[in-house]
Amino acid sequence: MPVFDRSNHGTTDGTRHPFSVPKAPRERHPNYHVRESRLPIGDDYVIDHDPGGRLFVVDGRFLRVRESLTIRDTSGTEVFHVQGTLLGVRDLLKLMRDGAVIATIRKQTPSSESEQDSEQYVVELPGSEHVEVIGSPADRAYSLSFCDFVVATVSHAWMPFGSGYRVQVAPEQDDGVVLAVTVCLDVMSRRPRT
């Protein structure tokens, strides 16, 4: 069973960026399954390594317009915390590790009338960098692009107990951050419109 080793992943002190352009292409990309369990009180997810075992459990609590998600490893230790507001044009979630914001996921206002029906998202990183969201998070068919390089691909996956999606992550990324971002996008894009 794979173990999530925080020492090999991005840090809040800036020593390693959670998103990067791989120095050399590799044939194998880590695959993950994210399974949801929608309950009346929140959005809960389980994240498994494929092949392998469970890596994270996401505990979501939806209280009016304030969103709070806690992502824990298999021992129950909090790895990420997500806090934000889901209020139409002010939809945003902040992804935090050890109390520091490492990414802000924001729903963008469409720039033209032809885009009014399509929701667009961006992942803002510290230092004015960003990760583009290309495709449809609501359909669970999209990719994340950093510096014009696809760092993750998300596709819908049928699962025997509930619905979910598959995530394929490029080498040299902070897989935990990438997976947390996909959960944020899933929560934001699947929330009923007000």
Image: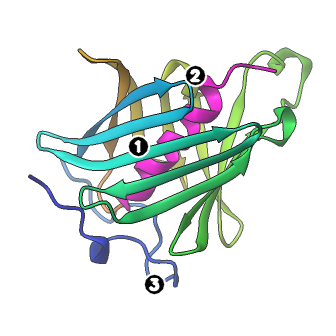
- Name the amino acid type tagged 1: Ala
Please determine whether, in this image, residue 130 is positioned above or below residue 160: below
Name the magenta segment's main secondary structure: helix
**Span colored in magenta:** 174-194
- 34, 14: nearer the viewer: 34
Number of on-image labels: 3
**Residue pointed to by mark 2:** 138
- Residues under labels 2 and 3: Cα distance? 33 Å
Residue 173, image x, y percentages? 37, 60
Q: Tell me whether the residue at label 1 lies in contact with that at label 2, contact meaning CB atoms closer than 8 angstroms.
A: no
Tag 3 secondary structure:
loop
- Residues under labels 1 and 2: Cα distance? 16 Å
- 80, 145: nearer the viewer: 80
- What's the residue at 41%, 43% (across, down)? 152
- Name the amino acid type tagged 3: Thr
Can residue 50 be seen here?
A: yes
**Residue pointed to by mark 1:** 152
Which label's residue is closer to the chain start, 3 or 1? 3
